[in-house]
Image (spheres, rainbow, N blue to C red):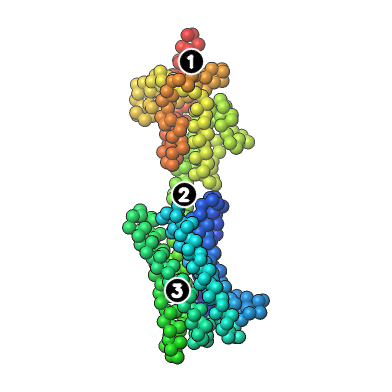
Amino acid sequence: MLVAVGHIVAALIAALALIVKLGALLRDAKNPRKWASAGICLGCGIAATAGWAPVHSIIDRISGVPNLAKLVEHGSALVTATAIQFLFLHLGDPQRARQQMRRRIVFLTLVFAAMTTMFWAADLRVSEPLHFAERYGHLPEMGIYMLAFLLYLGTSVTDTLRLSLGYARYAGTRLKWVMRLLSGGALFGAAYVGHKALFIAVNLAGFSAPWSEPLASQVLVTASVALFCLSFVLATIWKTADGVRAWPRRSNSYRQLHALWFLLYQAAPGISLHTPRRPERPAGASWGVGQRLYRRCVEIGDGLQALGPLDPEVKAAGRRRALEAGWAQDQADAAGEAAAILVAADRRRQGRVASRGVDPGLEPQPATVERPDVDADARWLAKVSSVLGEPLVKEAAAEALDVSAKG
């Protein structure tokens, strides 16, 4: 019963982790590390599922080959081990990863060929999903089979343990936790290899092991799978939690940016990648607010570029008016930017765009919208957006336009 529960738990953990990693893979399908992570979760899931007694029996019955499910289970474990090596090689040295993986693929092929040969050579007439090692561990063919299997698995977990501990020394707090989980998974994997090797040695020597091999093996496997899969989804869990915490702030920023965005959209409609049905109405961002906020900042940056350089004299006049009115320095800076944007938008509507020869002096410059810190860009642009309708700002813009018209 406990062994069956272990298989089910391991399979469910691997399936959930696979779903999370498939989402990341769809967003970045060319990233080999995403493929490796998905492959690890898939391999763990297949191994855990194939080893579960009901599935084991179904595979044997459909194929007509007793214990073929065991070969599937162990083969999936080898593929998982190879995927882990592939992941670490691409993390450490992507340029040499392909060359180094060739040697590991050759090693995997030789090991699996030896296992397959011994599997067909052994007399495995009775399907044994639970006590396979106890029933057939005394056979010389199974000794070679398990030696090849454990040799490859042991090499892989040793590599994983060495590399994860090495990365942990230089990692930040979050990545260090990921590496610790990987190290824990590798330790349980190493314990499984040692336990299995000891059990096979005891059986080949003609003795009976004084412990339950299926239960001990399943506990070690379940713990290893759980830690491995959790390490691969932990970053996604953290990112999701960060997004949930940031949602109120980002949603508010998204709404605050609407006034500035709509002004620029009226002046240059081409900035909108997906034009809303009612662009004049501020809309909330209930889903994917982080990406929507980033897109809105980019569109505002494109709109500011379309307006041309902002007039530094208008900016200075708007800032001065705000300071005289008792505004804080950052609000006064935003007022200056807003006044200059109003003037530039009006000139564009009249068909007059300033020459590119003048430094626009925008704070931040349009290009800075591409920085990773979207929240910082959004906070500044929201300040500019929030003062566009202030009488002080409109008066500064109207005065500049009046002077320009008279001139």
Q: Determine crowd level at label 1: few under 14, some 14-19, many 20+ residues with C-alpha closer than 10 A.
A: some
- Asked which secondary structure carries label 2, the reply is helix
Is 291 left or right of 375, judged from the image as shown?
Answer: right
* Residue type for callout 3: Leu
- Asked which secondary structure carries label 3, the reply is helix
- The residue wearing badge 2 is 243
Circle 2/circle 1 CB separation < 8 Å: no
* Residue type for callout 2: Gly
Give 91 or 377, whichever is nearer the viewer: 91
- Picture quadrant of residue 329: top left
**Marks 2/3: CA–CA distance:** 43 Å
Quick check: 207 above or below 296? below
Seen at 54% across and 17% down, the residue is: 352
Seen at 44% across and 58% down, the residue is: 89
Q: Position of residue 263 (x, y in %)?
A: 53, 27
Residue 401: mark in rendering: 1
Give 233 or 170, whichever is nearer the viewer: 170
Seen at 46% across and 45% down, the residue is: 248
Point out the tag, 2 or 3, that comes first from the N-terminus: 3
